[in-house]
Image (cartoon, rainbow, N blue to C red):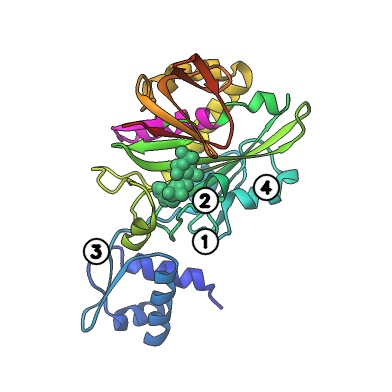
Amino acid sequence: MIDHWARKRQILMALADENFVSGEILAQLLGISRTAIANHISALEEYGVDIYSVKGKGYKLVNLVYLVDEEKLTAATHNRCFYFNELGSTNAFLLKHMDELKSGDICVSEYQSAGRGRRGRTWFSPYGCHLYTSIFWSFPQGMAQAMGLSLVVACSLVKVLEAFGVSGLGVKWPNDIYLNHKKLAGVLVEMSGQTDSECNVVIGIGINMAMPNAQGDAIGQPWSDLSELEHKPSKTDLVIALQKQLFTDLRLFEAQGLVAFMVRWQAADLFLNQAVILSMASNHVSGICKGIDDKGAILLETTQGLEAYVGGEISLRSAS
Ligand code: ATP
């Protein structure tokens, strides 16, 4: 029996040429009933794919859906790649299997039912619309060696996206990548390990490629995606490039620390020399953003002088 995802992928491929395709043609192509086609279509809609369905014409994708070519991905990297159609989250998968992993191993999923941001916030992850990936890395010298890691990953993302021709990128401390001042991608670092011995981390990355309408409406802040890009990268090429860049950057970070990334961070820092507010639970601090220090703390010029803030509970917002 053919896996239901294989069927759904066949349907998405048949709809990839941007014209309406009737239920009858789809049924013939796949050798299944029209009712089965209709069921797969409505399941795909539940997985977040926007599909026009017009009586007498058939079905048509609202946005193109980007699927990873697993064979090409696996052949292109020396590390292990775990590829799924659906998962709770790519971070959760790698965290669960941490003991069997080597630095550089990655997980990619076309859909996340429980994609997450910091502090348990939701990361919207509709099927095939965006890139959701995680990479495992082990820092031999413990947690202190991993401080500032999300900033390094943000720098890696900027480098990869720029190489694919994306301009207008910027980073927001400590974990977001913006395109034209709207959130394009997010990074979530999750750790396990003691402070002084080996520290194992899983780095989750979500990059928006083509946001479906309903999902976009549900995000409570301005967002962007790569849909306006003239030459859109294939998702497979994007994952391969990202894995390679992360491998290079994480090794550099391991050897030299955050100092090696200061120039790259500063060049992309959206809030450098701007008035910002840092929120920490019920506490707020205002000041002028002066970049970061070599531990990854944000530097703020306040009425008390230059202060450094670091911690997973801090959110940065523009003061204007
Ligand atoms: P902070 O400044 O504290 O990082 P944040 O709002 O950027 O705040 P994150 O935890 O980094 O929080 O990301 C989760 C938030 O990102 C969600 O609460 C939602 O507002 C937004 N979001 C969720 N999914 C997406 C997506 N696919 N694209 C862009 N933004 C998203």
Q: Main secondary structure of the magenta part?
A: helix
Q: Which residue is mark 2?
A: 121
Q: Position of residue 235 (x, y in %)?
A: 41, 48
Q: Which residue is mark 3?
A: 18
Question: Image quarter for residue 216?
Answer: bottom left
Q: Position of residue 243 (x, y in %)?
A: 52, 37
Image quadrant holding the N terminus, namely bottom right
Question: Image quarter for residue 248?
Answer: top right
Indicate the secondary structure of the residue bearing disc 2.
loop
Q: Position of residue 292 (x, y in %)?
A: 49, 20
Q: Which residue is mark 1?
A: 85
- Out of 92 and 85, give the one closest to the viewer: 92
Cα distance in 3D space between marks 4 and 2: 18 Å
Q: Are marks 1 and 4 in contact (CB under 8 Å)?
A: no
Cα distance in 3D space between marks 1 and 4: 18 Å
Residue depth check, mark 2 versus mark 1: number of the one nearer the observer: 2
Quick one: label 1 or label 3, which is nearer the N terminus? 3
